[in-house]
Image (cartoon, rainbow, N blue to C red):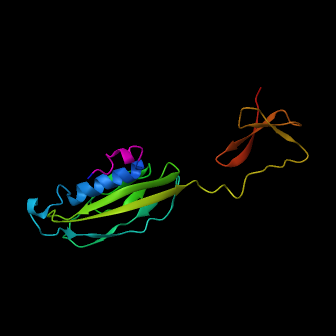
Amino acid sequence: MYILGSPRFRNFRLPAFIAVLLAALLATIGCATLDPALSTTNAAPKRIAISVSLPTATIGKLYNAVVSVNGGTAPYHFATKAGELPPGLILDAVSGSISGTPRAEGYFHFVLTVADRSGDAAGLKILGIGVKKPAADPHPVSVVVSPFSIQRDPGSRSVTSVCSAGIQYGEHRGSVVGVRRQD
């Protein structure tokens, strides 16, 4: 039977992510043959259930999510088989926690796998983590100097007082500071 190789499906393309997930799934469950007579064992593998809630992450803010498992025998080994975690996040192979500080915006899909110490039990779950930009600062800095007016020098972060040319104002650690120039 021809499915994807037939002329009827010549222009059919699986989205890359689905193709990667399908390959990871087949590799994890061991799909070498579908004929039970050719299989070396007919015993169903033991399954490990994976439970996790992955909240949305924010660029530049510390992130931590804990993966829980049920089944098999500890210690466990966690890994990602397909897709990718957001840049800046890592999976701890022993505890299963996902942590770090995300560096890029987007939605990142990956396949999380877990195996027990004997390798007789395994689990697999398709997950995704959304990463958003941080919210804009609700309190922008504005400076009013009266009776002087201040102009920002083009191309720099400093400003100069119009009435007091001997003082230069600038930003330092979120504050506006004035420095007397020594010409």
In the visual, does 82 lie left or right of 72? right
Residues rendered magenta in the picture: 2-12
- In magenta segment, residue 11: yes
In the visual, does 67 lie left or right of 75? right
Q: Nearer the viewer, residue 51 or 62?
A: 51
70 versus 11 height, above or below: below
Residue 26, quarter of the rendered image: bottom left
Residue 111 coordinates in the image, percent (x, y): 34, 57
Q: Is residue 62 visible?
A: no
Residue 9 coordinates in the image, percent (x, y): 38, 47
Main SS type for the magenta part?
A: loop
Q: Can you name the residue that lies furthest to the top here?
A: 183
Residue 63 coordinates in the image, percent (x, y): 46, 59
Residue 141 coordinates in the image, percent (x, y): 74, 51
Q: Which residue occupies 16% across, 69% down?
A: 44
Q: Nearer the viewer, residue 175 or 11?
A: 11
